[in-house]
Image: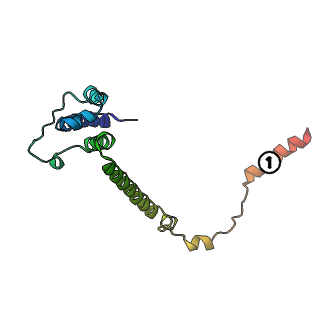
Amino acid sequence: MVTNTKYNNYRKALVEVDAALKCLKYDDYQKIPQDVFEMIENNMDKEYDYEFDENVEYEDWNLMPEAKALLYNIFKQYLASDEQLSYLNMKERFERSKIEEQKKKNYSNDKLFENYEIKKTLQKNNQLIEYKESVIKKFFKRIVAFFRNYN
């Protein structure tokens, strides 16, 4: 389920993606299918105005994380050479393995119960408690038993 804020962020990110794609060279621009541009045009926020300085390098543009992710996927899918694609795939595998290692470290069985302290005094004092039935319960049980035996 996409929240309203996330939806609006992606619509604004599409504006930034559109601005970045318009700065591509003609040959690279032609590599991207027309339906991608139509999807961007149909779903972007028409009220959001993204301004950038063409004299500033792309890396220095102030892009939303969502826009960076979309541009990365467009580059990977349509513009990357085989060498670049293999490098990106290798880098993604490396990043995923780092994340998995961190998860293993954070959630290992040893660490899971590291802060769990067993109180020895409670274990030593664990004794059976004698259950004493109240006088009223005993009385009602005898009455019920009497009527059961009576029938």
Quadrant of the image containing the N terminus: top left
Q: Give the SS element for disc 1.
A: helix
139 up-or-down from 102: above or below: above
Badge 1, how many Cα within 10 Å: few under 14, some, many 20+? Answer: few
Total numbered circles? 1
Q: Which residue extends farthest left?
A: 55
Q: Position of residue 50 (x, y in %)?
A: 16, 36
Quadrant of the image containing the C terminus: top right
Q: Position of residue 126 (x, y in %)?
A: 64, 69
Residue 31 quadrant: top left
On the question of residue 69 being in view, the answer is: yes
Q: Position of residue 49 (x, y in %)?
A: 15, 33
Q: Indicate the colouring scheme.
A: rainbow
Residue 36 quadrant: top left
Q: Is residue 57 left or right of residue 131?
A: left
35 up-or-down from 125: above or below: above
134 up-or-down from 77: above or below: below
* Residue depicted at x 12% and y 40%: 52
The answer to which of 70 and 29 lies nearer the viewer is 29
143 up-or-down from 12: above or below: below
The answer to which of 131 and 7 lies nearer the viewer is 7
* Residue depicted at x 18% and y 38%: 25
Q: Is residue 31 left or right of residue 136?
A: left
* Residue depicted at x 28% and y 34%: 32
Residue underneath mark 1:
141
* Residue depicted at x 13% and y 48%: 57
On the question of residue 17 being in view, the answer is: no
The answer to which of 101 and 32 lies nearer the viewer is 32
Q: Is residue 50 left or right of residue 125?
A: left
Q: Amino acid at mark 1?
A: Lys
